[in-house]
Amino acid sequence: MLTFVVRRLLLAVPVLLGVVFVVMLTIDLLPGDAVTLMLGEHATKDAVAVLREHLGLDKPFAVRYLDYVTRLARGDLGRSIQQNRPVARELADAWPATLQLTIAALLIAAGVGIVAGIVSAVWPNSVFDAIARLASLFGLSMPIFWTGLVLIVVFSLWLNWLPVGGAGSLSHLVLPAVTLALPSVAMVSRMTRSAVLDVLGEDYVRTARAKGVGEPWVLGKHALRNAFIPILTLLGLQSGQLMGGAVLTETVFAWPGLGRLMVKAIFARDYVLLQGAVLVFALAFVVINLLVDLSYGLLDPRVGRQG
Amino acid sequence: MTAWSRFCRNRLALLGLALVVVLALSAALAPWLAPLDPTRQTLIEKRARPGGKYLLGADEFGRDILSRVIYGSRVALLVSVLSMLIALGGGLLLGTLAGFTGGWLDAVLMRGVEILLAFPYLLLALAIVAMLGPGVLNTTIAVGIWGVPAVTRIVRGSVLTLREAEYVGAARALGAPGRALLRRHILPNIIPGLIVYATLFMANAILLEAALSFLGLGVQPPTASWGLMVSTGRDVLLVAPHVATVPGLAIMLAVLAFNLVGDGLRDALDPRLR
């Protein structure tokens, strides 16, 4: 088990180095120059040159990449251009808010999605099933930044139940988390429905029923346990969706997280900060999918040991 | 039963197809359908409520929302069709190259795909559009490139499976050259799956274009883009909620249309999956 974890972590290193490479190259090709943007259009050529040198932008791309990676190995992500603070500090400040938001959304997605999917599969083509399938179609089709605005109009403006935006209390978390979760609820319930339906058609389920095992036991012991692997895989993939969606949700609800920080960094051409933010998102995505792979072993004794 | 007749028996899929037709007509006939000039500003009538002269109301600058929604369908369709072609073209090329040649080229290409897939949804497109700068064309390119890695992986997977299929082996044994194998035997079998993927990709492309434009990194004003319209409406959300909500409905219906057609096509083309 330990060798499996270590091997997977080592395999993640080149992927993350590749992510850094792609982001740095992307930013390197930016048409707008960060330095000119910082100093304003009327800056003298000397001032621009001095600042470029100070930021190390005069060196060739390969040198800067190696430089960044070596400093990264020591945990140094550089200093943000706008605030002139260590990027690691800025990311650490914003990270908890995004973590809180995505975990809340993931819990909603898993809870509501799995329950709805199971009910749909146990009573296929029932009224509940029809409504759930229609709702999931809409859930997948609504742009989340718009869903967020509609929820604000209904729950903050008309009903006056929840705050419009910002962070601080649990009531601030409700609308952003629900908004972010909706497309994933739809995906999870669809996947759960088809996974449970598949398993319920298996021979061993028929055998269990034939020998008189009660329906709740069939569902809990046989169906759900086996249906869980595709559902778990989907939840891992959805975490990437949630992190990307967090950029939009945080913008809509003025939620002080990584996503909003990233959008600000793009507009300010603060490439050092942007680089760090993307790296953290990619790292989180890789780690979550590693955790998902590891948990297969817990659910299915056939998987995991040898990797 | 043919795939088409199976598709026609699916009422939801037909509804989706009808919506796609409406969308295409609205894009093609925008200048004749739009009751008013989508860019004409009348500041006296800004934020006009729906009804009367402005059927769906007017926005912050007094522009007719209905006309802007109709013109917005052009941007949505243009970006989604072109980006779909980029994603399919790039993915087909790289996927067949990786799957058919194998070896070090396959290894390098697939590591590259893995890296691009490690970007959580939206972030890759964000990074690309940050590089290229905003605008309709650059948004299209960003959305298209975002789709390439996934298509590459699907195509490579199918090529690898089909390459080992018995009828392909038979053709090879009869002396068919590699190009003929690819064109006559492998590609035709990948196409049905890709059509389904392309339709569902269109739905995602519309969502992604809207999201980029909403963030201010996609289509720029004064071009009428649905995502941009929602973003403008956001500033007056509390006094005139219709400005943001109406264009959002248009996004939802367009995305729903392609999702319904995609689901219907999948069921029709591969009845075993039902």
Image (tube, rainbow, N blue to C red):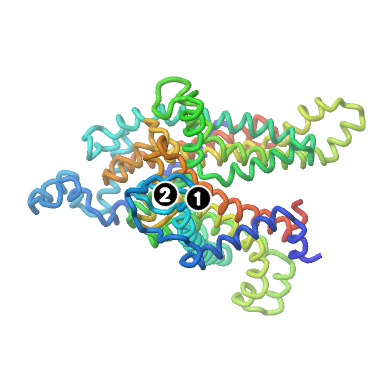
Image mark 1: chain: B
The numbered mark, 2 or 1, whose residue comes first in the sequence reads 2
Quadrant of image for the N terminus of chain A = top right
Image quadrant where residue B88 sits: bottom right
Relative depth, front residue between A14 and B247 = B247
Nearest to the observer: residue A214 or residue A40: A40
Image x and y of residue A162, in percent:
47, 24
Three-letter amino acid code of the residue under disc 2: Ala
Q: Which residue bears the numbered disc 1?
A: B207
Mark 2–mark 1 CB contact (< 8 Å): no
Q: Is residue A194 visible?
A: yes
Residue highlighted by disc 2: B58
Residue A132 x/y as whole percent: 69, 38
Residue A66 spot, x, y in % from top left = 29, 47
Say what amino acid the circle numbered 1 marks: Leu
User: In whole angstroms, how far apart are the C-alphas of marks 2 and 1?
Assistant: 23 Å
Q: Is residue A121 left or right of residue B200?
A: right
Tag 1, which secondary structure?
helix
Q: Give the quadrant of residue B102.
A: bottom right
Which residue shows up at 47% across the image and 21% down it?
A170
Q: What chain is tagged by disc 2?
A: B
Which residue is rendered at x = 56% and y = 65% of the image?
B25
| Quadrant of the rendering where the C terminus of chain A is positioned | top right
**B232 in relation to A176, above or below:** below
Mark in the foreground, 2 or 1: 2
Nearer to the camera, A139 or B164:
A139
